[in-house]
Image (tube, rainbow, N blue to C red):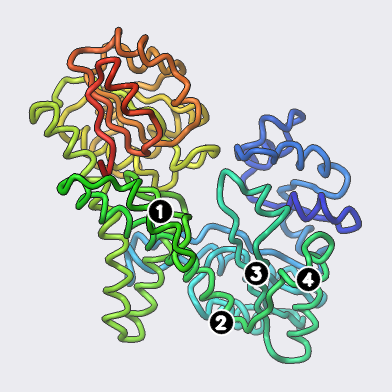
Amino acid sequence: MAVIAQKCPHIKVTVVDLNEARIAAWNDPDTENIPVYEPGLSTVVAEARGRNLFFSTEVDKAIDEAEMIFISVNTPTKTYGTGKGMAADLKYIELCARQIARVAKDDKIVVEKSTLPVRTAEAVKNILQNTGNGVNYQILSNPEFLAEGTAVEDLHAPDRVLIGGDTTPEGQEALNALVEVYANWVPRERILTTNLWSSELSKLTANAFLAQRVSSINALSELCERTGADVTEVARSIGTDSRIGPKFLKASVGFGGSCFQKDILNLVYIARSYGLKEVADYWEQVIIMNDHQKSRFANNIVKTLYNTVSGKKIAFLGWAFKKDTNDTRESAAIYVADALLNEEAGIAVYDPKVPESQVFFDLDYLGTRSPEKNKQLVTNFTDPYEACKDAHAIAILTEWDEFKTYDWQRIFDNMKKPAFVFDGRSIVDSAALTDIGFKVYTIGK
C-alpha cells in the first residue's frame, strides 16, 4: 500500500487495522520506528504518509469511502478442527467480508491480497452477495510475490504482477481498474491477467516450487557430508545449467518465513480434499525434508559436544528467518533452540533486529515448556561479543552480513575450548576460522 501511494499520488490509500497499537506505530512521527523493518520502507512511508497514505483504526469509514478494498489479513494454518495443522484458517477473511457487506452502500471491487487456498474468492463472493445492501461486488485475486528483505525493490520493479478476475464483462472491467493502478509504474507486459482460480493457485505453486528447491539441495547436503562432496560446488555446477538456474540452491539449516510452509501445507490439504493422494504426498515431502534439516542441525550440535549440552552455553547468531527483516515466523532458529532446550542447554541469542520480547513469544508459542523455564534457559543480548563470551559453541542461524565482519579472533579468545562454530547458513570463511583454532561445521561439507 505504501508503494502504491508513493507511485500513484492521485490515489488516496488508507490502511486500516483494529489493532490500535499497530496503527499508532505506523503513525510514529519518526518513520524509522515503523513496526516492519524492511530496507527502504521508512523512506517510502515518509514520502507518502499524510499526503495520500493514511493509517487509521476507523475501519467502517474507510470501507464506506473506498472504491477498491484490498483484504490483507493473516491466513494462518489452522490449529483446531478439520484440517488442523494443514488447512488455512479463513476466519479473518470471512470477518473482513462480513464487515464489508455490512458497511458498503455502493459498488466495490474487493481484492484478495492474502495468500489463500483455491476458490476462496467464491466464499467471499457468497458472503458479500447474500448479506449486502443490494451492492454489486467484483472479486479479484492479486497475490503478492515479493520477498522479505528486498520487498521495496521487488515492488518497485516486480518480475510480474498477477491479477485474476471473472471472465464476465463486469469482471474484466474490475480487473482493468486494478491493471491501471499498477500501470502507473509497472510495464504493461509484466502485468499478467488470468481467471480467478489460476491466480489463486499460482501463488501457492510459486512458493511450493521455491521451497522444493531449498529442500532438494538440503537433501543433497546430507549426502555431500557423508561422501566428501561439497554442496556449494554441487550447487554451482548445476546452477550454471540454464534450465535449472542458480537461485534458491543455497544449502542451509532450512527455510522459514510466513509463506513457504503454510502454502505447501495448504496445497497438500487441497490435494487431499480432492482425493489426490500422490499429489499430496509429493508436496508434503518438501516439508518433511525441511523439518529433518532443522532437527539434524540440532542433533549434530549435541553429538559434536560429546553427546551432552546440558548446562552448556550455546550462542545463537540470528533469530530472524532471513537477513534484512525482523520477521521470525517459522524461523529455523526457533526449532533448533527448542530442540537444544529439551537437552537443557543454555541459549544466548543475538539478532540485530529482533527484540527480546519476540524471541520469548516465539518459544512460548510452541508450548513445549513453561514461559518461566524458557526465561531461565534463554538470555537475549544486544552485543554479539557478550553473547558469545564463555560459550561452548556458536550456531549461525541467520545470514546477516555483519556476522562475516566480526573480530573472530576476539570471539575465539573468550570462548570455552574446544570452540565450535556451526554455520547453518554457510556465510563465514571456514578456512580462516579453522586457522584461528575454531572447529567449524558447515552444512553440506
Sequence order check, earlier mark of 4 and 3: 3
Residue 340 screen position, x and y as percent: 21, 34
Q: Residues within 10 Å of mark 2 (few under 14, many from 20)?
A: some
Q: Secondary structure at mark 4?
A: helix
The residue labelled by disc 2 is 197
CA distance separating discs 4 and 3? 15 Å
Mark in the foreground, 4 or 2: 4
Q: Secondary structure at mark 1?
A: loop
Sequence order check, earlier mark of 4 and 2: 4
CA distance separating discs 1 and 4? 31 Å
Sequence order check, earlier mark of 1 and 4: 4
Mark 1 and mark 3 residues within 8 Å of each other at the beta carbon: no
Q: Quarter of the image holding residue 285?
A: bottom left
> Mark number for residue 142?
3
The residue labelled by disc 4 is 188
Tell me if residue 387 comes above or below residue 256 in the rendering. above
